Each structure stands twice: as structure tokens, then as C-alpha cells.
Amino acid sequence: MDIHFSAEEVAFREQVRAFLKANLPQDIADRINQGKSVCKADQVLWMRTLNDQGWLAASWPVEQGGTGWTAVQKHIFDEECSVAGAPRIVPFGINMVGPVIIKFGTEEQKAHYLPRILNCDDWWCQGYSEPGAGSDLASLRTRAVRDGDDYVVNGQKTWTSTGHMADWMFCLVRTDAEAQQQRGISFLLIDMKSPGITVRPIITLDGGHYVNEVFLDNVRVPVKNLVGRENEGWTCAKYLLTHERTTIAGIGIAKAMLSRLKAVARAERRNGKPLIEDPHLRAQIADVEIQLMAIGMSNLRILASAQEGGVPGSESSILKIKGTEIRQAITYLLTKAVGAYANPFLKDELGYDHEGELLHSEFSNSSTCQYLDMRKASVYGGSTEIQKNIIAKMILEL
């Protein structure tokens, strides 16, 4: 069954569609709809367009530049943007550090950073994971030692998405080596241009450069860049992660991917018939679609429960797991549908940067890229195993 929308919500959907039709550049939409990547400049252009409309920071309080939308309106907006082929809102500034600064930051920090986040003047990255502290994040070892008006930071972060493009990093550091794991951690804002920072690329399975290693060697960070209280950064971290795991479900993206899968299945032929008529594939597509409808309803319930300025609870782990599984299933079916045309493993043929003649269809070039890229979704934002532990402990009380 589908969601029943009120007349006001239907009118809001039409408003969003009209805005997208008038303001979303067609060349950007074409790349997104073909499963290709877009450059930083295109992402910034789109986010600034949304900010000019007042639609960029849907999860922020109205007085800080938020939209005041209901959970259903946020759902409608995300869905329509995905269907139209709009670039996703890069989450690190808007959906991660922004809410943390609003909740825990000083008035000076809010006045300085929030307008710059909204206008995309600063590009943010996340300094959480380390080589020995991924899903077990509380075991992190990056140290920050107070020296006058600065902290001196030494350590290493890894899997740092867009770190090679970032102006700033929000970073978890250990400020009390003697305290138990979570109690000695602080939340710092670090200028990526600071002396002592080295960024090294990590090339992922799909041949792309999105994640990095970041080395911090005697990096001096002003004490005024501490968010919240010293040694209480774990509170900020948990607050951020629950927001991340709600948005990381990628429901709107999954709906767009499902539409792409159906289009491929209608275009491809097997034994002289459209592939969509194959009973086995139809059943697999139907199963994914049912799961997607169910998680969509669950997402609305969880967002609605946090409507009054609260934070989503442990249920966000359910969204993270199921959202990951659904998108992985869709990319698997997409590569299966295009068959042998999903095989090439050459960067220019994978589709991210390819501008020449397509190998087969507008989807075949990027299907392998998307399939490989989605393998990492089981790990980032907290691995599936860790999410199951959270569900068992916090929800099932096992």
C-alpha cells in the first residue's frame, strides 16, 4: 500500500516538482540518472541553489535556517529530488556537524560556522574511524594534548570521505588517556590547511577516489574549536551518528535506483522477450520493492517521533541495515539485468568519468560501478554487525 497524503502534502509535492524542473540543471540530472558521479562544483552549485530557496537544511531549527518541514514533507522532498536526478546533499556539513554545533556549540561557533555551512563556503569531512578503531570507535587513539590556548593533535584517521576536498574536519580525539574509552574523548573542529596534516588517497574497488587516510602530526588546534565539554565528546558523537544512520538509509536514492532497474528490465531482452517478463526476475524486483515500501514507512515513523527537536533513537540502526541491504540488492539485479555488458573493469568504461560512446545502454556503463561502490555500505556509518548489536541491546534488551 502507498502512503496517503493530505491535500497540503500533495500541493507541497507539486511545489517541489516545479522547483526542480525550473532549477535543476539538465546536464547534472542526466549524469545522476545514468548512475554517474558529479564533481564538487556541481554539488556546491546545487546545494547553494537549495539554500537560496531556503530548502537546504531540512533538519535544522527554523531560527538557524531550517525549513520547518514535517517528517512527511522531508520524505516527499527527498523522494522528488532522487526521482528528478538531483545530486544528494553532501551530509558532512548539513546533516552531521551542523546539528552538533546547533546542539552543543557556543554562540560564537554557531555564528561563525552555520552560515558558512549553509552557503557551502566550507566543505567538511568526518574524522572518526581509525585503523584500529572503526566500528569499535570508542577505542580511538588519536591524541589531543592541551598546550596553552591550543590542543596538539597526533594520530591517524582513515576512510575519510572527501577528505582530499575538505576545508574542515570534525574530529574525535582522546583528551584523557587514563579515562575509560568513551569518557576521555573530545569533539574538535580542525582546519584542514593546518600544518602537519597529510591526506593520502584510498582507491576503492570501483576505481574511484572518494575516501582517504589523514595523518595528523603535531597539528595545533585552538581550544575555541572544542565543541561541547572536554572529555564529553562521545555525547556529540552519538548524537551525530543517530542522524547519520537515519539519512544513510537512502530511501529516496533506492527508489530512483529501483526505477532505473525496471527501465533496464523493460529494455533488455531474453529469448526474444523483454527481461521484465521473466518470472524469476519479476519476483526478485517485487521482493525488493516491498521491502523498500516497508522501510519507507518505518523511516517516516522514526522521523515523526523526533519531530519536536529530538533525535532519532536506536531504531535508526534498523534503517541503516535495511537501507543497505535493499540498495545492494538493487545494484546486484541491475548488473544481472545488463548481463555481459556489466563485465568491463576499465575506469573510463565504468561510467564515472566516461564521456564517450556508451558500451551498450545508458545504464550498462555504470552498473558495475554502482554494484562495487555499494559493497562498502555494509561498513561505513557503523558496520552491519555493530548495528545488530545495538538493536539487540537497546531495542530487544538482550
Image (tube, rainbow, N blue to C red):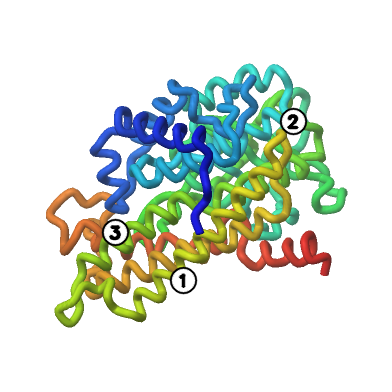
Kindly identify the amino acid type of the residue bearing the numbered disc 1: Asp
Question: Which residue is located at x 59 percent, y 57 percent?
Answer: 320
For discs 3 and 1, the disc positioned in front in the rendered view: 1
Kindly tell me whether residue 360 is visible in this rendering. Answer: yes
Ranked by sequence position, the earlier of labels 3 and 1 is 1
Classed neighbour count for the residue bearing mark 2: other residues with Cα under 10 Å, few (<14), some (14–19), many (≥20): some
Q: Name the residue under label 1.
A: 287
2 and 3 marks in contact (CB < 8 Å): no
Relative to 217, residue 139 above or below: below
Relative to 131, residue 164 above or below: above
Kindly tell me whether residue 156 is visible in this rendering. Answer: no
Kindly identify the amino acid type of the residue bearing the numbered disc 3: Ser
- Residue 329 is left or right of residue 271, and the answer is right
Question: Which residue is located at x 49 percent, y 44 percent?
Answer: 199
Relative to 77, residue 112 above or below: above
Report how far apart the C-alphas of labels 2 and 1 lie in the structure: 42 Å
Residue 363 percent coordinates (x, y) = 25, 59
Ranked by sequence position, the earlier of labels 2 and 1 is 2
For discs 2 and 1, the disc positioned in front in the rendered view: 1
Q: Residue 166 carries which label?
A: none
Question: Which residue is located at x 25 percent, y 70 percent?
Answer: 338
Q: Residue furthest left?
A: 357
Q: Residue 104 carries which label?
A: 2
Relative to 72, residue 61 above or below: above
Kindly identify the amino acid type of the residue bearing the numbered disc 2: Phe
Q: Mark 3 points at which residue?
A: 366
Classed neighbour count for the residue bearing mark 3: other residues with Cα under 10 Å, few (<14), some (14–19), many (≥20): many
Q: Nearer the viewer, residue 226 or 379?
A: 379
Question: Which secondary structure, mark 3?
Answer: helix
